[in-house]
Image (cartoon, rainbow, N blue to C red):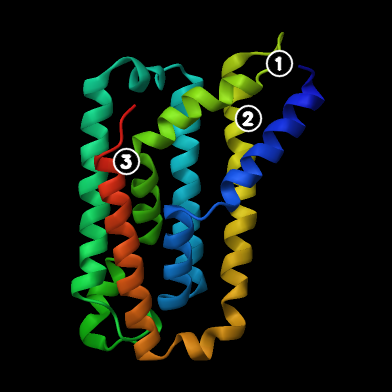
Amino acid sequence: MTLIDSLMSFTFAITLLTLTPGLDTALVLRTATSEGSKKAFQAAMGVNAGCMVWGAVVALGLGALLTASELAFDVLKWVGAVYLCWLGLQMLIKPRSQMAAETTVANSSHRKGSNWFIKGMLGNILNPKVGVFYVTFLPQFVPAGYPVAAYTFGLAMIHVLIGTLWSSTMIAATRPLSRWLKRPAVVRTMDRLTGLVFVAFAVRLATSKR
């Protein structure tokens, strides 16, 4: 496989996978509609940071531990499932009725504590399926004669770039609908639907196998 073939094949494959609706898409869309573009972009950057961490781990060869050690996979899997379930239940039990920028002063301390960059990053890092995916997928596109570590991390950066473009597109698409999306009933519905998605992903993660 030549360098051009590698880059073209990987870019095509990872673009299709990025466009496939999943947990990251749900997180960015929910945050854009109920928290605003700024918070949604923070969440997207958090997801990308998680991809960068996994890319670095895999590039250094540590990601192979997830495929070699069932215990390591199970521990990270359950921690991730609990975290996703906790996020989902919060949205189901206490859905918001207003955009973050419109909440009352009484809720200001809660707003300040909502760091969507951290939430997006942890949601990605605590999902061992991402690590296993990187371990099994990225090496297939490393052409002969190129440094594996540097090239693997470079592929992860391509994934991050495509993810940023896709997230930005989704966030921008919510702006024309902002007035409608600010309605209390819509915000509550989005929170509850996203909460269900998060819980479903938590169950799926908890029951997944290597």
What residue does disc 1 label? 143
Q: 56 or 140: nearer the eye?
A: 140
At which x and y percent is residue 9? 72, 31
Residue 198 against residue 9 in the figure, above or below: below
Residue drawn at point x = 33 percent, y = 51 percent:
201
At which x and y percent is residue 25? 49, 58
How much space separates mark 1 and mark 2, taking CA atoms?
Answer: 13 Å
How much space separates mark 2 and mark 3, taking CA atoms?
Answer: 22 Å
Residue 200 against residue 110 in the figure, above or below: above
What crowding class fits label 1: few (fewer than 14 Cα within 10 Å), some (14-19), or many (20 or more)?
Answer: some
Q: 46 or 171: nearer the eye?
A: 171
At which x and y percent is residue 208? 30, 36
Residue drawn at point x = 41 percent, y = 77 percent:
34
The answer to whether mark 2 and mark 3 are in CB contact below 8 A is: no
What residue does disc 2 label? 154
How much space separates mark 3 and mark 1, taking CA atoms?
Answer: 30 Å
Quarter holding residue 119:
bottom left
The answer to whether mark 3 and mark 1 are in CB contact below 8 A is: no
